[in-house]
Amino acid sequence: MFSKIVYCKSLKCGSYLVHGSQSGSLSIQSQSQREHHWKMSHNVDVEKCLEVASNLVSEAGRLIARNNEQRQDFVCKSNDIDLVTQTDKDVEQLLMDGIRRHFPEHKFIGEEESSGEEGVKKLTDDPTWIIDPVDGTMNFVHAFPHSCISVGLKVNKVTELGLVYNPILEQRFTARRGHGAFYNGRRIHVSGQKELGKALVTSEFGTTRDEAKMKVVHENFEKMARKAHGLRVLGSAALNMSMVALGAADANYEFGIHAWDVCAGDLIVREAGGVVIDPAGGEFDIMSRRVLAAATPELAQEISKVLTQFHPLPRDD
Ligand code: IPD
């Protein structure tokens, strides 16, 4: 019987699980033993999940890239700038059906399913795929080439894998918890920038025009335009976060995002060495519809002190 499990990162060969037994002796697990332990206790083969998800997003990506060659018809969801196309629905269906074939007991929180009558499903400890089939739908409708598929997998409410794929520009970001972040197969790291005055910051106008939120958006844009090195609006929350992971941008913040916009991006940023927190400076809460990602804790804290705060309602839970 083990009395406690401690992560020990100081050992030379990466991270090991060190088990302290009741008698006080220690045993050390290697990476492969740790993965075996993980599979046994949670019955989730994360490597296999990543392989399945990667193949499915490649297939779905072909659909997005083909349809992005011309402007798309759309339907408005909650308001006149919250859009959905047939491709959003087809891609979500393709991903969910494909994942279900391999993992029939896994659950889903998908953007398009969530806009139905049942609303956003409750996040439980069960393996749950959090999916945005087309993040940047406004871009997609206009054939502006910054849209992506965003897929995250949570087990016991912890994100185990994240995948953000822009099939139009062939940009694929992937991360597995504890295994680093990658861009088109190459390991990536955040920039290391600590000062807002030298930081390239990304944010968004969002998909509502409600007055109170717009006032905060404008106030914060004005502050960033004065204090940051530069401000960019890509039109996709998941790609904004991926740019932080890539070291191409230094920070991203937004009020009004949903869990499916940021689940994958959160892990990709953290696995690239960055931080993801609540914009007021506390712990990130994926259901709060608030996010601040940055290359360093110093930069994140500096931005959190500058931002005018907003708490979008309803939350995602
Ligand atoms: C939206 C985009 C947009 C961001 C919104 C998201 P969607 O996702 O990421 O850039 O401002 O908050 O909801 O609707 O294109 O999937």
Image: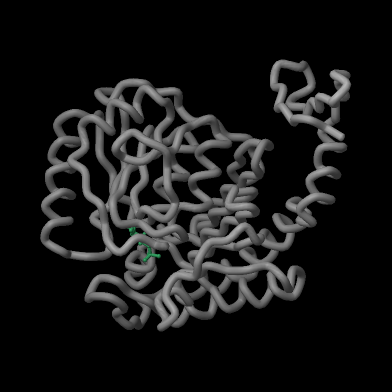
Residue toward you, 122 or 306: 122
Residue 34 drawn at (x, y percent) = 81, 37
The spot of residue 189 in percent (x, y) is: 54, 31
Image quarter where the N terminus lies is top right
The quadrant of the picture showing ligand 1 is: bottom left
Q: Residue at x 39, y 62 (%)?
A: 316
Residue occupying the point 70% across, 74% down? 100
User: Residue 28 vs residue 75: left or right?
Assistant: right
Q: Residue at x 51, y 73 (%)?
A: 66
In the rendered image, residue 185, in percent from the top left (x then y), is placed at: 66, 43
- Residue 9 image point, x, y percent: 69, 21
Classify residue 65 as left or right of residue 299. right
**Quadrant where the C terminus lies?**
bottom left
Snapshot quadrant of residue 153: bottom right
Relative to 168, say whether 11 is above or below.
above
Q: Quadrant of residue 142?
A: bottom left
Q: Is residue 69 visible?
A: no
Residue drawn at 73 percent across, 52 percent down? 46
